[in-house]
Amino acid sequence: MTAEAVESPAPAAPTGGPLLGPLSWNLVYVDDLAAMRAFYEGVLGLPVKNASPYFAAYHTGGCTLELMARKDNGPAAGSPARGWDRNRVLMSFKVENMTAVVAELTRRGATLLHGPSPTVSADGLPPEGQVAQFIDPEGNIFELCDEPLFF
């Protein structure tokens, strides 16, 4: 998303440093870990970082993506909600060639929901890239974006 960079000081922790550290992982609660692993590994091609019978973690750059089948600290199993009714958090993966990646994921069986379409930009400014949104086997939406990273 394009916007003017506005620097504001982060709230200080009691130790005087930043209150929060970097985003370390995104966790997706799943009902069928085997099916979700087949999708994230086979269709998206994410490399496995660590796995167990109820958990899988993937290398995605600076932030780990985790699939969690245990619901000890999460939602009830078997939610019928899908897409935007399921949640309001969107995982976005940076890509360099939107057309090629969309074509390859579609060829591998991923379901394209939206796009590619222009990214949101500040009023009066042209978009800096495109986004495309897909849905995984349990109804979670993820996005591809080819806009330059702003950090």
Image: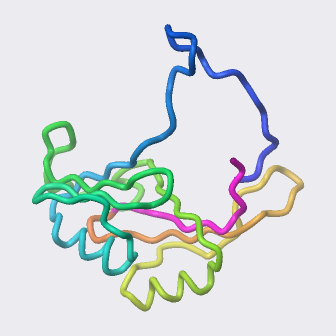
Q: Position of residue 143 (x, y in %)?
A: 51, 65
Q: Residue at x 26, y 65 (%)?
A: 138
> Which residue is at the front of the view, 41 or 80?
41
- Whether residue 99 is situated above or below residue 48 in the rendered picture: below
Q: Residue at x 31, y 60 (%)?
A: 49
Magenta span contains residue 110: no
Q: Quadrant of residue 83?
A: bottom left
Point out the residue furthest to the bottom here.
107
> Which residue is at the front of the view, 131 or 84?
131
Per the rendered image, the range of residues in magenta is: 140-151
Q: Position of residue 45 (x, y in %)?
A: 38, 76
Q: Residue at x 30, y 66 (%)?
A: 48
> Which residue is at the front of the view, 34 or 125?
34
Q: Quadrant of residue 18?
A: top right
Horizontal arrangement in the rendering, residue 130 relative to residue 41 (left or right) = right
Magenta span contains residue 148: yes
Q: Quadrant of residue 46?
A: bottom left
Point out the residue furthest to the top here.
14
Horizontal arrangement in the rendering, residue 102 relative to residue 37 (left or right) = right
Q: Position of residue 79 (x, y in %)?
A: 20, 54
Q: Residue at x 16, y 70 (%)?
A: 34
Q: Position of residue 20 (x, y in %)?
A: 50, 26
